[in-house]
Image (cartoon, grey):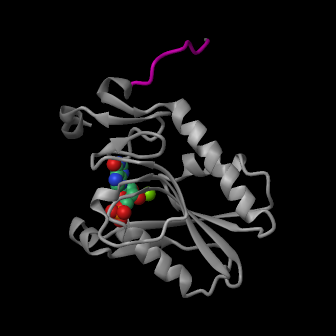
Amino acid sequence: MTFTQRTNPYEEHISEVIFTAEEIQNKVKAMAKEISKDYMDKAPICIGVLKGVFFFMADLLRAMPISLEVDFLAVNNYSPDDRKQGVVRLVKDLDVSITGRHVLFIEDVIDTGLTLNYLLRNLKERKPASINVAVLFNKPKLRFIDIPIQYKGFDLPDRFVVGYGLDHQEKFRNLPYIGMLKANSILEV
Ligand code: IMP
Ligand code: MG
């Protein structure tokens, strides 16, 4: 039996495409070029926070023709209240030591900045040679904490979006673009 072409079943839940797959790919390539230039001789450890980042990270790093290593962290929020206070639980730590190394911290989306702030503090205690942040989607409106971001992709409006790694209840990550969910889909899915 052959698998015939079909549309992604998530499509019907999207009310508006915010960034197309092509726009995202072009932006990721431009970011990769800039980062590669800066890290040419630094052999960075590129650290991503699971799970949302893995689509962006896979495309970004494959467009960077330099020596680098990859590692991941995974975090959970204990509760919505904890999330508001920036309390995150590390459920997977790094496999490698970053002491004395150049770290490129990669995030899919920054909203309040609380998660990133917590993780950066944690990583800095391990005395890396440097840490810079690359983020694809930035929501400037909700930022509680001012965090320097060296490499930024798109600014997003203060709206909940899905696709290209971003989920709603673990779904929608595999949409190749960024879209807004229809209001009733937020409840249904
Ligand atoms: P914050 O910066 O600590 O507020 O949290 C960022 C995290 O919230 C991200 O890593 C995502 O998991 C999640 N997040 C924030 N905005 C969105 C969105 O629009 N869609 C899906 N997930 C989001
Ligand atoms: Mg994330």
Q: Is residue 169 visible?
A: no
* Picture mark count: 0
- Front in this rendered view, residue 140 or 105: 140
Quarter of the figure with the C terminus: top left
Location of residue 76 by image quarter: bottom left
Left or right for 123, reference 81: right
What residue do we see at 37% from left, 67% from top? Answer: 113
What residue do we see at 47% from left, 45% from top? Answer: 165
Helix, strand or loop for the magenta stretch, by majority:
loop
What residue do we see at 31% from left, 47% from top? Answer: 157
Left or right for 51, reference 44: left
Location of residue 28 by image quarter: top right
- Front in this rendered view, residue 76 or 118: 118
**Ligand 1, image quadrant it occupies:** bottom left
Left or right for 87, reference 101: left
Above or below: residue 180 compared with residue 142: above
Residue 158 place in picture, x, y as percent: 27, 50
Above or below: residue 101 compared with residue 24: below
Is 39 part of what is drawn in magenta? no
Residue 15 place in picture, x, y as percent: 28, 28
Quarter of the figure with the N terminus: top right
Residue 121 place in picture, x, y as percent: 47, 81
Is 4 part of what is drawn in magenta? yes
Residue 34 place in picture, x, y as percent: 67, 54
Q: Is residue 101 visible?
A: yes
Q: Which residues are magenta?
A: 2-9
